[in-house]
Structure formats: C-alpha cells, structure tokens
Amino acid sequence: MRTPADAWLALRMFGWRLVLPALKRMLPLDTLASAMRTRPGRRSEEERVVRLASWVYGSRPLTGGDNCLERSLLLYRYLSRTDPDARLVVGFRHSGQAVEGHAGVAVGNRPMAADTDERGPYAPLVSFGRHGRIAEGTRHGD
C-alpha cells in the first residue's frame, strides 16, 4: 500500500473477494461478466490494479486458495475502467486424461498477471469484451 487510494481500492477488492465465490455459483458466466464490467471512469494505472489484485488474492485465508476465475473477474472489473478493451478470457487445455480450465484478463494482446507453466497454453473458449458481452468470434464449441 503506497497511498490512501491504494488502501481504498484494496478494501473494495476485498469486498468483491468475499462475494465472488457465491456469485460465481449463482449466476451464469455471461451475466456475471456483464455485472463486473465497469464503464471507463477514474483512471488507475494498470500496474497498480494488477499489483493490488495480486496482493488481495495472495492472502488466501479468506477463500482457502487462489481462484483464477474470481481473480480474473476482479481484474476485469477494475481494468475495464483503465482500458475499454479489457477482456475476460476463459479457456481450457488437456492435461493427461483431465481437462483443465483457466480464466485470465487481457488488455489488447497483453495478458495481465498471466500464469505460465510448463504444461502449455490454454485454448480460448470464450472472451467477454466491451459491456461484458461475448466478444465477436470468440465463442467456440457451440
């Protein structure tokens, strides 16, 4: 925390962290993405938003672990204020006999707070763009 504005933003992020586990179980993903999308407003720099969201989700006692969908919904909410082209991206990959899912946020072609590992990339299934709507040409497997 560097400033009172950082503390206020982190407090709001913690509030969302508390309600997102229930919301993701009660609402369809497209409804939730639309609800999390915000209009451009107060400009926060991307690095600040990513840093604070990582800090909020780095302290795991509240939910018992890191959850990429919750973290990405939070990033999507606050990054959509800094850039109207922020996208929530959900994808899958095969890992042995299992299928693994992952959610992330991209601004332009840059993944924000990307998770990398040696098992390879995720194939995008759906992407939510402006206004929380499914981005044109990104829904696969219909």
Image (spheres, rainbow, N blue to C red):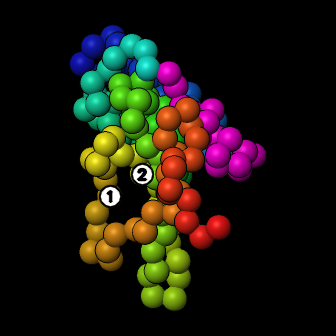
Q: Which mark is residue 104?
A: 2
CB under 8 Å between discs 1 and 2: yes
Residue 89 appears at what percent x and percent y? Answer: 46, 52
- Magenta stretch in the rendered image: 25-39
Which quadrant holds the N terminus? top left
Residue 27 on the magenta span:
yes
Q: Is residue 138 visible?
A: yes
Look at the numbered disc 2 and give the secondary structure of its residue: strand
Give the residue furthest to the top.
Answer: 4
Which quadrant holds the C terminus? bottom right
Residue at point 40% right, 68% down? 122
Q: Is residue 4 above or below residue 139?
A: above
Would residue 98 be found to the left or right of residue 84 on screen?
Answer: right
Residue at point 29% right, 35% down? 51
Residue 108 appears at what percent x and percent y? Answer: 31, 42
Question: Residue tagged by mark 1?
Answer: 115
Would residue 132 be found to the left or right of residue 53 on screen?
Answer: right
Indicate which label's residue lies in the foreground, 1 or 2: 2
Overall secondary structure of the magenta section: helix
